[in-house]
Amino acid sequence: RATAAVSSGVWRAAPVAVIGGGFLATSSRAWRSLRQPRWGFRPLSAAATMAAPTKPKAPEHPAFSLLRSETIEEYGATCHVYEHIASKAQVLSVIADDDNKVFGVTFRTPPRDSTGLPHILEHSVLCGSRQYPTKEPFVELLKGSLQTFLNAFTYPDRTCYPVASQNLEDFRNLARVYLDAVFHPRAATDPTVLQQEGWHYEIAGDDGNKLEYSGVVYNEMKGVYSSPDALMARSAQQELFPDNAYSVDSGGDPGAIPDLDFEQFAAFHGEFYHPANARIFFYGDDDPSARLDLLEEYLADFTARDVDTAVKAQPLSIATPKKVTLPFPASASDDDEGGQHMVSVNWLLDAEAPEPVDELGLAVLDHLLLGTSTSVLRKALTDSGLGESVIGGGLQDELRQPTFAVGLKGVAKDDVEKVEALVEATIANLARDGFEADDVEASLNTVEFQLREFNTGSFPKGLSFMLGMMRNWIYERDPVDALRFEAPLAALKDALDNDANAYFRSLLELRFVKNTHRVTVEMKPDATLEASEKADEEARLAAARDEMTPAQLDAVAATAAALKEKQTTPDTAEDLATIPSLGLDDLEKKVKSIPKDVGTVPGAPGATLLSRELPTAGIVYADVALDLRGALDAEDLPLVPLFGRMLQETGVSNKYDATQFTRRVGARTGGLQGTIMNTLKRPLDGGVATGDDLVYRFILRGKATRERASDLFDLMADVLVDADFASAEQRCTEMLKEAKARYESSFRTSGQSYATLRISSGLNLAGAVSEATAGVTHYQSVLRLLERAKNDWPGLLKQLEAMRSKVLANAASSAVINLTGDAGALDAANAALPALAARVLAGDASSSDHPPDWSGLKKVVAPGAFVVPTQVNYVAAGGSLYAPGEFPTGADSVVKRFLSLDYLWNRVRVQGGAYGGSCQFNPVSGTFVFSSYRDPNLEDTLTAYSEAAAWMKALDVEPAELTKAVVAAIGDLDGPSTPDQKGSKSLRHFLDGTTDEARQKHRDEVLAATPADFRRFADRLAALKTTPAVFASAAAVEAANAKGANLAVTKLL
């Protein structure tokens, strides 16, 4: 269950490697889905006319007391709040017209130390239970469910277990498995679960004379503690909250995790995982009476008891602002020219949670300060030249009290105090002078648009509601109030209409300027820290070994052997049969088409117009997709990410400076965002792409209400035609510094993404372009471009201007404009479209049939080992599973998924201790790649990859397991999509050649998968010539090469 940090919590996701890369940025900071739910949404066009929804009658149940029912007008939803009479469990049942149903149970789990007990327990309860005694029901559900969300995550004070599905039977199956898991887990009585998920000793050394720590969470947190950003955030939180549960690490400190014993572990579950400490949530269009019946199946076992798990408020007790200095693992080169220090200034903003109007006011203030590249505080920091990238994240409001953090990374050691002083001075000046009226209008409009649109993307809306409500519910505040925003928004608007600067001055004075509960955290690079931490760990292990008698050492070996035996012993058929699953008859057999009208753009007959009518509540979503493949030369490619940002963040020549342009976008639209599409075009015959038929486009996406369609298109044209490159010398340098810093951070924490890119780069043109624009090769280009920006700005500017000219010259014959909206929105967009076409598509409509030669890109790179300061490894290996012209089938996706969730899960994660292991297969390019995440091993993982084919050849796929694999593969195809996502997907399908016929063929092949497909895949896997790429520490690479890995070594950081 590979995790990533989410908000304040630790998040466990399905084990899929992420393909990362690039540094294209949006014109405004994304409004995080985990912050949206605090307020909710209402469609813009319906705001004045929407009738109050009919409140469904609350179902009654003898086991539950109905406390109240409330209609939430902002959602058109009804909330029934119950208490389970016997156990005192709290239940919130939300009835909404949404088939993506959500269930979740959340416990308050404030930690008492940094052993990571809440986090380890979050992993462990999903490892078998009373009714579902398999070793990992979580994985069995991933293997065979139509789930649209299946996960668990740990915050500093709570642990959440949510699921979602559009299929009613599947949804209830998921809820039952999770309820049994949290209330009756095997982990509470079986120490091997703690050993696997938390930590245990292993006998190591050639002579068996050493001890090692192993365990999934132990290795996960070693990865977390390799990240300077994570170390800084941890320190800031603990210093700001010295007197409550936030003063320790709920995720676990690797130095403290081995202090956790099974007695503590079991007692924690018994104390905290009781219904009296639970907040249980339902959402969707399912029968609310059946929800209560389902809950009673599990809650009937419990009676009420006193459970004191409240998280106390942290007093504003720091009378004089504090300064904390900590080391982070770095290479010796990080001390060149004064070093790459990091510094953040952190405030605890309130002694209690703010009132709703001020909570919303703080969100607008956060956007004013940091929300865009031209926001006052962000701009002051970037323009200062004191560092490479703004850090901190601004407002954090998911915990008991809100905090604010901001700073810089890539700071010279002599400039650390200057950063702190600049933050203080900028905020003090704003408290004195206020904000420009246009800035306030833009930020307020941006936040209000996001509240009303409430676009959670692929994240279930019901889960956003749940997580937002928890920000009240677990602190004994009204969870239903957490869904309302109209009243606080109206009150805020009144305050801003009266005197906006007086309002914001008040917020700044009270919560920042006069607030001494502030901590400045400096992180300083330490080239010896990695080695010293390893030496400390080895010393602890040696001391532990020296204290053991021979009998105790034998017991350690026996315990490790018993754990290994349990891990390698398959679940029985009887146990597997307890996991509820769907059958093939429950699956939709036909693909769902997305409507699309294809025409030409008025006034530009060489350009294509796509449009579709979908319910968007008066919002128009527009894309302009410009061809880069036919326009740019190979030497332009390293500049493409920079080019994309320069278009969006440099203002408009003779019209707006960068700040004015950002204000205009914020005040008139829902935002603009540039992305890159890079993929091989799908052959019509369904085979692997031959040659290098590449789709490579810059796509500018914007959204606005239909009344603002002309404003939206005018601003999109400004971006594409008149972005003011010439005045952006300083901003260009800042962007490159930010890109450098972002790469150097993510190499340590997402190495599997870059390893995958590196492998793919030598296999096809799409992979080569990704590496050149988003991988290690691009990082090296960024370093050169940074020097060029400093020393040859005229030359760099000339190349950027030439790139724009080439792209626009090609646009009239190749551009695609894509519109999504309801009838009124499309009418408004079509009326405004000619003006956009006249500016953007004014070039010659003729085009060349011979795009520029990029063939040399394939020869750029070679894989190997990339050395970075880290305590864990990221290990990948892959190659071409299918050659050009060969024909993959949809069944391959079934097999690939099974390989990830069975063999790699067990071999790399469960037995190897890595935090995640997976494989990816691209049927268009034929590329197949294994990867691991936060992995304590290197050569052993490469060995596991090499033995995957033999495992699969020996595999006897039972009919029930095959059915589950097919169900899950169909689930991957059928996730819910919002109207704007459907529009984007339709555009991508048009550009890459995906037809409904091809989608149906793929679906039919998935549904028809047989054991023979597993054997066929195994034969291909056996013949696969893999190339490795790893991101690891110097010591790990040296040890692997000593054992014969023969990895070419590149010192990256």
Image: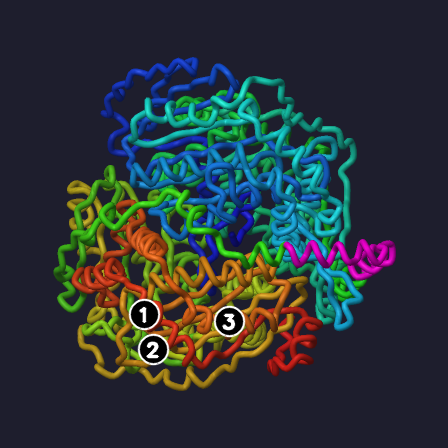
Q: Which residues are magenta?
A: 536-562
Mark 1 vs mark 2, CA separation in Å: 8 Å
Please name the amino acid that badge 1 sits on: Pro
Observer able to see residue 229? no
- The dot on residue 923 is 1
Which dot, 2 or 3, sits closer to the camera?
A: 3
* Nearer mark to the viewer, of 3 and 1: 3
Label 1 Cα crowd, 10 Å radius (few <14 / some 14-19 / many 20+): many
Residue receiving disc 2: 882
CA gap between label 2 and label 3 equals: 18 Å
Res. 945 mark: 3
Sequence order check: which comes first, mark 1 or mark 2? 2
CA–CA distance in space, label 3 to label 1: 20 Å
> Quadrant location of the C terminus?
bottom right
Tally of numbered tags: 3
| Figure check: 351 above or below 845 | above
Instruction: Give the vertical position of 665 relative to 599 (above or below).
Output: above
Q: Is residue 82 magenta-colored? A: no
What numbered label is drawn on residue 976? Answer: none
Q: Earlier in the sequence, mark 3 or mark 1?
A: 1
Residue 216 location in percent, x, y?
61, 54
Which residue is at a point 72% across and 56% down the rendered structure image?
A: 201
SS under mark 3: helix
Residue 173 on image: x %, y %:
37, 38
Residue positioned 49% across, 62% down in the render: 904
Q: Quadrant of residue 453?
A: top left
> Is any atom of residue 813 visible in this view?
yes
Label 1 element class: loop
> How far from the left and from the top, in percent, is residue 222?
66, 56
Q: Quadrant of residue 541?
A: bottom right
Q: Amino acid at mark 2?
A: Tyr
